[in-house]
Image (tube, grey):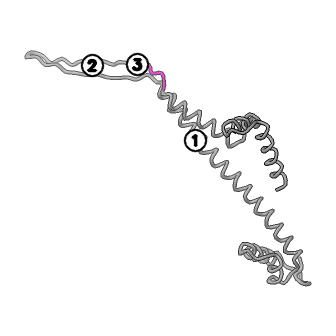
Amino acid sequence: MERRGRKLTRAQREEHLSEVAHLRAAHKQPSEIARLRDCSVDQIYLDLQLLRKRLLAREHKDVDFLRNEELMRIEAIEVEAWRAWWRSQEPEETTISGRSTTEDETTERASLTRRQRVGDARFLDTIYKCVDKRCELLGLDAPIKVDLTAEVVAIAQAEGITEARAMELAHEILALEEHK
């Protein structure tokens, strides 16, 4: 880029872009930024376009990074839930010991009882939630289909509007949305 005939170094270019970003964040118009930075309005529009591209790329990377962090966190929770589930199915051992004393002798007793456990379903619920959240983060859930006609008819009946009038209003709203 040239500023009124001068070629900028990479460092100068980055400083220029930084200043353009700050001025735009301060709600300055491109023409005012061009005047303050001593360059053309066209150059400012190109700079703003480049800044937008960089921001989107950075946000995309940030979102991917955060998504991966959450996936790792979910994985750790799921691993612990599986371990707890398997432990909750292990047999439970109970030891009972006692001592009885008479005038002539002391007797000690001990008994070991084993009871098979079926497992704590709360751990399975945690595992299910992990799987569900992972599918949501990865976008694996099927899109939800909504029958808009049925929704419009239901609302029309609740509001006391005829079905035909409700559909007419819905089409008008959709037409307005298309023109935005």
Q: Which residue is mark 2?
A: 110
Observer-nearest of 113 and 8: 8
Q: Nearer the viewer, mark 2 or mark 1?
A: 1
Query: What secondary structure characterizes most of the magenta part?
Result: loop
Task: Report the residue at 87% width, 75% height from top.
Answer: 43
The type of residue carrying mark 2 is Ala
Q: Amino acid at mark 1?
A: Ala
The residue nearer to you, when weighing 17 against 73, is 17
Query: In which quadrant is the N terminus drawn?
Result: bottom right
Report the quarter where the C terminus lies: bottom right
Q: Is residue 127 left or right of residue 176?
A: left
- Label disc, if present, on residue 76 of the rendered structure: 1
Dot 3 or dot 1: first in sequence order is: 1
- Callout 3 crowding tier (Cα within 10 Å): few <14, some 14–19, many ≥20: few
Identify the mark nearer the N-term, 2 or 1: 1
**Marks 2 and 1: CB-CB under 8 Å?**
no
Gap in angstroms between the C-alphas marked 2 and 1 = 41 Å
**Horizontal and vertical percent for residue 138?**
71, 42
Q: Earlier in the sequence, mark 3 or mark 2?
A: 2
Let me know if residue 62 is in the magenta part. no
Question: Element at badge 3?
Answer: strand
In which quadrant of the rendered view does residue 45 lie?
Answer: bottom right
Residue 152 to residue 174: above or below? above
Residue wearing tag 3: 115
Residue at image location 76% in from the left, 40% down from the top: 166
Which kind of residue does numbered mark 3 sit on?
A: Arg
Q: Nearer the viewer, mark 3 or mark 2?
A: 3
Q: Which residues are magenta?
A: 114-119
Mark 2 residue crowding within 10 angstroms, few (<14) / some (14–19) / many (20+): few
Gap between marks 3 and 1 measured at Cα = 30 Å
Q: What x and y, as percent, mark residue 20?
A: 77, 75
